[in-house]
Amino acid sequence: MSHNVLDYFENGAARNFPGKVAIVDGDRSYMFSEVESRAKRCAALLVRRVDAINRPIAVFLPKCAEAIFADLGIVYSGNIYTNLDVKSPAQRIRNILDNIKPVLTITSRALERQLLGLGVPESELCFVEDMLDEEIETDAAAIDARLQHIIDTDPLCIINTSGSTGVPKGVVLSHRGTIDFMDWVFDTFDLDDDLRIASLSPLYFDIYTLELNLCLAKGATLVLVPDQMATFPAKLMEFLQAQAISFLFWVPSIMVTISNLGLLEGYDLSGLRTVFFAGEVFPMKQLNHWRRVLRNALFVNLYGPIEIHVDCAYFVVDREFADEDMLPIGHPCRNADILILNDDGQACAQGERGELCVRGSSLALGYWNDEGKTANAFVQNPLQTHYPELIYRTGDIAYRGERNEIFLVGRKDFQIKHMGYRIDLQEIEHQVHCIDGIANACVLYNQTRKEITLFYEVLSQDVIPQQIRAGLLSIFPKYMVPTVFHRMEVLPKNPNGKIDRNGLASILHESRG
């Protein structure tokens, strides 16, 4: 039985396909033997620098092969990787580092000044250029000694997600949860070493977990899609064709754009045989278009919040749907269980809406350095009170349909899924209130138009949307900044004195079209 995700690599591609191309990064490519040697050189240096196991080590690099070598090197050293977004505003990066407190940060010399400017001591930096030096001697015994102390419930990585107080939450994922999910993937789908994966998502997103382990276990080739290509759908299609891509795991937004632009018919994607998608709703009209053009491809809708090891439910799109139909998230993945509970903590009847909750090894270990938030989200299963058993309350509203398939309805709270990212609207509100001249603010999401919308009152008539946007761009990544602004004399209040969010939501409803 596997107890470390490295078993996938050691018993899979490293053993069976050492001379096969593992990673394509622009005009560079690396064989599995090269991935192994580079990862172990990284690990050798980390073992000398960090006299501990199960400690977080940050990776502050753009999406590149070196970041993957670093992640694997961290795992080989017996520690926990956490990938950071080098494009995030300085304050957000600082907030993450203050919360995670990594023992080291792996970066490049080109990014050194950026981290020093954030207050990271030079003594806590580790340069990838040094780690990949071929003169470094790899001490296999020292690495093995570290790994002997790792068990399957130990942390593998930390994924940083939005938090309601302005401080990102660090979701801790384990080896066991990752292995359970990946074993299910391998047993359920026909995936082999012939696959060429178009890796579009950033490495700090959970889709990367599936892509990386599929590559390491099965010998599939991981083709890194350049970051800027996502904004040029036609170039992205050219890339898929030129690279003979056969596997995708994307959020639906870009796929909807590709469909809307009519690009599918203009390129030869006949080799594309497996399409996973997750992170947000895929409108049936555009999904039907993809299915009509790629008749031989398998389409799979996956569901799971960041607090789950990648995903916990899936639906193989195996029947026809009308354009106006809702796509189910289907059924639980193996060794995961989904409960739909009403406000009293009781199981909902078929067709009854309630909060979707998850139990099983798919649950994250919790939030790094935050017992309070962990205790609020990971709670005792109210349907089973005889022994301790945690469930994760997702905040998603769902119901079971006539086929016992699960359908999502919306969010219970103010968290949303936008462009594949989990975003807490209250985090944006918190920062809007910090902008000079703002009296009050409420942020809502226009689900139809996929727009983050800000309603606000001002203290000064000089405050304009451009100033608010500029202020938020200094704190948040672009996908978290509102694109629609409504200035109001007074935000409506409900009888208990709180902002009338339902009343504001009706304005969004009226603006649909």
Image (cartoon, rainbow, N blue to C red):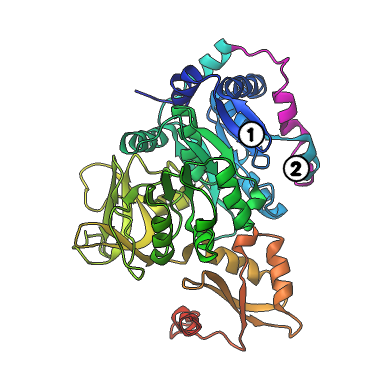
Q: CA distance from mark 1 to mark 2?
A: 21 Å
- Spot occupied by residue 29 in the image (x, y as percentages of width and height): 64, 30
Q: Residue at x 71, y 30 (%)?
A: 128
Q: Residue at x 72, y 61 (%)?
A: 474
Q: In the rendered structure, which segment of residues is drawn in magenta?
A: 115-139
Residue 312 picture location, percent across and down? 35, 47
Callout 1 amino acid: Ala
Q: Is residue 225 above or below residue 500?
A: above
- What's the amino acid at mark 2? Leu
Q: Which mark is residue 65?
A: 1
How many callouts does the rendering have? Answer: 2
> The residue tagged with tag 2: helix, strand or loop?
helix
Tell me if residue 473 comes above or below residue 369 in the rendering: below
Q: Is residue 71 visible?
A: no
Question: Can you see residue 289?
Answer: yes
Tags 1 and 2 in contact by the CB under 8 Å rule?
Answer: no
Residue 52: which quarter of the image? top right
Can you say whether 43 is above or below 403 in the image?
above
Which label number is shown at residue 115?
2
Taking the image as shown, residue 460 lies to the left or right of residue 497, namely right
Examine the structure image and report whether residue 59 is included in the region drawn in magenta.
no
In the picture, the quarter occupied by the N terminus is top left
Q: Which mark lies nearer to you, 1 or 2?
A: 1
